[in-house]
Image (cartoon, rainbow, N blue to C red):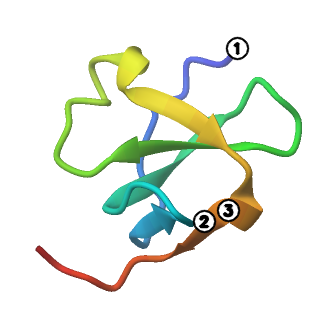
Amino acid sequence: MTDKQTTALPGSWRERGGLSGLVRLNTPAITPGMVVVAKIGEAWQAQSELRWQVWPDLLEPDNIDD
């Protein structure tokens, strides 16, 4: 593990058939090939339990601004 600060990568994403308003994070996923995401507006920087991993091919650009 590195002590690199977790940050959001550019863009807003949604899971195909699931949640919208997600950000991809620069944190490596535990499972090879997966990416780490979090919900925009939640305290994922301070609470790692608010981050989860998904397969990148299940993410789509989320162009809806709420």
Say which residue appears at 26% left-offset and 51% top-offset: 40
Residue at image position (75%, 65%) is 57
Structural distance between the alpha carbons of marks 3 and 1: 26 Å
Front: mark 2 or 1: 2
Task: Tell me which residue sits at (11%, 73%) in the image.
Answer: 66
Asked if one can make out residue 18 in the rendered structure from this viewpoint, the answer is: yes
Cα distance in 3D space between marks 2 and 1: 25 Å
Q: How crowded is mark 2: few (under 14 residues within 10 Å), some or many (20 or more)?
A: many
Determine which residue is flagged by label 2.
Answer: 59
Residue 2 image offset from top left, x and y in percent: 65, 19
Q: Which amino acid does label 3 sit on?
A: Leu
Q: What element carries label 2?
A: strand
Report whether 7 appears left or right of 39: right
Q: Which mark is residue 58?
A: 3
Residue at numbered disc 1: 1
Say above or below: 4 vs 37. above
Label 1 neighbour load within 10 Å: few <14, some 14-19, many 20+: few
**Residue 21 pos. (x, y %):** 31, 61
Q: What element carries label 3?
A: helix
Disc 2 and disc 3 in contact, CB within 8 angstroms: yes
Q: Choose between 34 and 46: the one closer to the eye.
A: 34
Q: In this view, does 10 lie to the left or right of 29?
A: left
Tell me the crowding category of disc 3: few under 14, some 14 to 19, or many 20 or more residues within 10 angstroms, Cα based. Answer: few
Type of amino acid under label 2: Leu
Is mark 3 in CB contact (under 8 Å) with mark 1? Answer: no
Q: Which of marks 3 and 1 is nearer the N terminus?
A: 1
State the residue lying farthest toward the front. Answer: 17
